Each structure stands twice: as structure tokens, then as C-alpha cells.
Image (tube, rainbow, N blue to C red):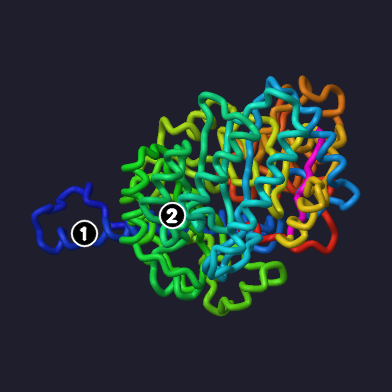
Amino acid sequence: MRDQFDPSLDGFDAQSPWNKLRLVAQFDLAQAAARMSVLDEGMEHINTLRALGLFDARVPRYTSYPTAPVFSAAVGGDFQANALAALDPAQPVSVYLHIPFCERLCWFCACRTQGTQTLSPVESYIGTLEAELRMVAETVPAGLRMGRLHWGGGTPTILPPHLIHRLALAVKSAILPCDDWEFSVEIDPTMVDRAKIDALAAQGMNRASIGIQDFDPQVQAAIGRAQPYDVTRACVDDLRAAGVTSLNCDLVYGLPHQTEARIADTVAKVLALGPERIALFGYAHVPWVAKRQKLIDEAALPDDMGRYRLSELATTQFSKSGFEPIGIDHFARPGDELALAKDEGRLRRNFQGYTADSCATLIGLGASSISRLPTGYVQNAAATAAYIQRIEAGQLAGSRGHVMSPSDLLRADAIEMLMCNFVIDLDVLQARHGELVASLDRDLHQIADRFGNLVSLDSDALTLLPQGRALTRIMASVLDAHMPEGVRFSRAS
């Protein structure tokens, strides 16, 4: 007896109805076998990822190195003042400005925010920001220029037009923009109208980032964020009409009640908006940090495999729609500056995620903002009241930070290379850091031994292969010489 029916045998009648049925059945069996082979390979790969810690590990997102939990109160306002005064005026800087206020506090959010139903505290806060800007302007060297400006929150679009103009002019008075500067703003479509968008555009906004998370009403209800599609569509139309040519949409997978069908529908709606960039973040359920997350029903959260499938499904949809993957969680249309930066090897990673920003210095303004300075990091007082108190006392608001050692600078470069390019180029590190690069040998070999055929290590580079990229943050943590004990980070998956 043969294992399969063989139509090549002598005497085979292809027109026989019975033989036709046998051929169809054999074809179906072959197709099913092929599908099972693919599924088996997929499950084997998932099991490999599971064994290497993807579904269990809690590691930093590495938007900085060292990460913020390492910062010390021993580094504060004095370091901040000295580092700002020592900046090279020939090198443009980025400026980040934090607006911590929201009219509604979304339950999933772990950002530093506070609720308000009136504009009174917001207007008072703008006055404090103006005072901080004046102090920074008096501290930095004359002639310093601003290459990038980003307003984040909270909800920057809580500001009415007159406060938008007032704040933007204060920033420009403190640090003059370069001719080709970029001004980006995080926008809540439910908290913006055409007048606010026109005010932002008049002040130079040329890129916008819209928080979406998920368009399904049940998911939105479960995270305390109602945001109808038609409201978001109207916001996008207004942004385009105002001349904004670069639009980013933020999505989150792993939310309560999220299913593959629901996220597929959300992705289709997002693609219909026509953004140039998309960020796809895994929901970080950290109720011990963000108390409001206790309002989320943990039983409704997808399990490990559910999260993984949601991420893979959305990624596949974006790729089929022509978006290029950027790092571990961003996507961009070909020709977008972010895609060009990836192709040209100049992609960077900062507190907003992946960026084409080439400025070495980031000056953070407002409560909880973090500055990345040539010699280290410093974070402003996190609580809004503490921040205001420092500024009103005539002090810069830095309250904690970290001074970078030569080893920190080396490891920061190596981790950023891995996170951005999936390659640690040892020749480049050698040129930048000299013989200190040899101090990475033990960690690189540990990565190669632990992750096996998912990485390649030779004398020139450590390369993370595509099938292992889900483990990027875990690999980066091997290079982290400051992993703090007792700190619970978000999950790696």
C-alpha cells in the first residue's frame, strides 16, 4: 500500500469522478500538511522565545542609559547649571516641554499627569515654565540654537490658543530656533479643535503625534478613554489642512478585551488616516507605579500568547501596507525621515522612542522632564508642586540625575546600536571609546552563548538576527551595568 495516491501510475484516468475527488483530497491533505509544518515551525520558534524569557522577563525599554531608576538625588540643580553653561553654542539642541495636565486621566497611562477641570492651574503652570525658560536662557551660552521642540504630556492640547501662542513665544525667546527646526506636539483628538491646531501651526508645528491606543468601544471603555473614530478623523483633516505633513499615530497592544479581530479593525482604521509613522507599544501594566491602573480588570488582559499574536498581527498588517519596521516598535513609510535615518544608520532612541533627531543634547522643561546633557542626565522635580516651588525659589528644577562615566558612555552607545540597528559595531565603538571597548567582551560572549543561533558574534560586530528581535530588550539588559535591584520594569513582550 502506498502512503499517497500517485496519479503518475500507468492506467490512471484523470477524468474519473472518483479519481478527481481523490486528487482534490490529496491536494487538500498536502496543503494541510504544509500549514501544519508552518504552524509547527511557528510554535517551535515561540517556545524558543519563551525559553529565553520573552514572556517572563521585565526589563527597561532603554529610552535612556542608564535608566531613570538609577538616578540619584546627589546629582541635581548644580550639575544641571554647570552642564547647561558648558554647552557648545555651535551645536543645536532639542527641547522637550512637559504639560502634565489632563481633563481626563486614562486608566492605562503611566505618565506623570494630573487631572484638572479648570484652566486656572494650567495658566499658573505656564507662568512657571516662563520663569524656568528665563533661567535656562541666562545659563546657556549666548547664540545657542534650537533644532527640535517637542511638547508632551499630559495633554498639551489642553492649552487654549492664547496660551499656545504665549508659551511658544517664550520658548523661542529663550532659545532661538534654527531655520530648519522641527516642532512636534502630542495631540489628544478629543481635546483639540481647529483654533488650537491653527495656533500651533502658526507657531511652527510641522509634526503631530496622535494618541489612539485602540478604536474599539469596549477596549476604550475598559481603559477610560472614549475616542470615536470620526473625532480622530476630523482632527487629522484639520492637521492636514493646517499644513502638518508628518503625522504619527500611537497604538497599544495587550489592552483589556483586545482581540485579534478588534486590533485588525483598529489597524485598518489607522491606515485609513494616512499617517507617515506609527508606534506600536506593548501595554505596561504597572499598577504599583501608576495607581490608576488598578481600575483596569486584570482578568480581561490578554495572556502571553495573546499579547504576542496581537503584536504580530498588527506588525504584519503594517508591513503589507508598505510601512517599514523601525527598531522594535515603530513603523514609517518609505521616504519618511525616520525610514531614511534607519537606512542611513543615523537612527536614534530617546524618551519619545525612535527619532531622527541628531541633536546630542536634550533640554527638558517642566515637571518631571529629563535633560540629556553631554556629561549626564538630570530630571526636574517630578511632582508639579515641588517643581513650582524650586522655580519660584529662583533655582533650576533638577532634583536627581546621573553623571556619565566613560564606561556608561560606551554602554549607552552599544545599547542604542542594538536597539536601533540590531547590530553592535565594535569598530565604531573602538573609534569612539578606544581600548575601553574590550570591557564589553564578557557581556557580548554571554549574549552569544545565551541566545545561540539568534545572534552572530565575530571580531567586528554582534548582530541580532531577525528571528530574535523580539528579545532585543532582554539582550540589551545583559549590557546594563546598572540594573537596579528591587525595581519592577514592564514586561519584555
Q: For this view, does 442 lie left or right of residue 250?
A: right
What kind of element bears circle 2? helix
Q: At 51% from the left edge and 48% from the top edge, which residue is drawn? A: 164
The residue lying toward the viewer, choosing from 380 and 463, is 380
Q: In which quadrant of the rendered image does the C terminus lie?
A: bottom right
The image position of residue 347, as x and y in percent, is: 58, 33
Q: Which mark is residue 276?
A: none
Q: Amino acid at mark 1?
A: Val
What kind of element bears circle 1? helix
Tell which residue pokes out farthest to the right in this image: 74
Q: For this view, does 97 lie left or right of residue 5?
A: right
Q: Amino acid at mark 2?
A: Ala
Q: At 48% from the left edge and 50% from the top edge, which residue is drawn? A: 162
Q: At 68% from the left edge and 23% from the top edge, which residue is drawn? A: 143
Q: Is residue 380 magenta?
A: yes
Q: At 31% from the left edge and 49% from the top edge, which residue is drawn? A: 237
Disc 2 vs disc 1: Cβ atoms closer than 8 Å? Answer: no
Q: Residues within 10 Å of mark 2 (few under 14, many from 20)?
A: many
Residue at mark 2 to residue at mark 1: CA–CA distance: 34 Å
The residue lying toward the viewer, choosing from 103 and 29, is 103
Q: In which quadrant of the rendered image does the N terminus lie?
A: bottom left
The image position of residue 356, as x and y in percent, is: 56, 33
The image position of residue 172, as x and y in percent, is: 58, 35
The image position of residue 417, as x and y in percent, is: 67, 34
Quarter of the view holding residue 293: bottom right
Q: Residues within 10 Å of mark 1 (few under 14, many from 20)?
A: few
Magenta stretch, main secondary structure class? strand
Magenta residues, start to end = 375-382
Q: Which residue is mark 2?
A: 314
**Is 149 above or below relative to 53?**
above
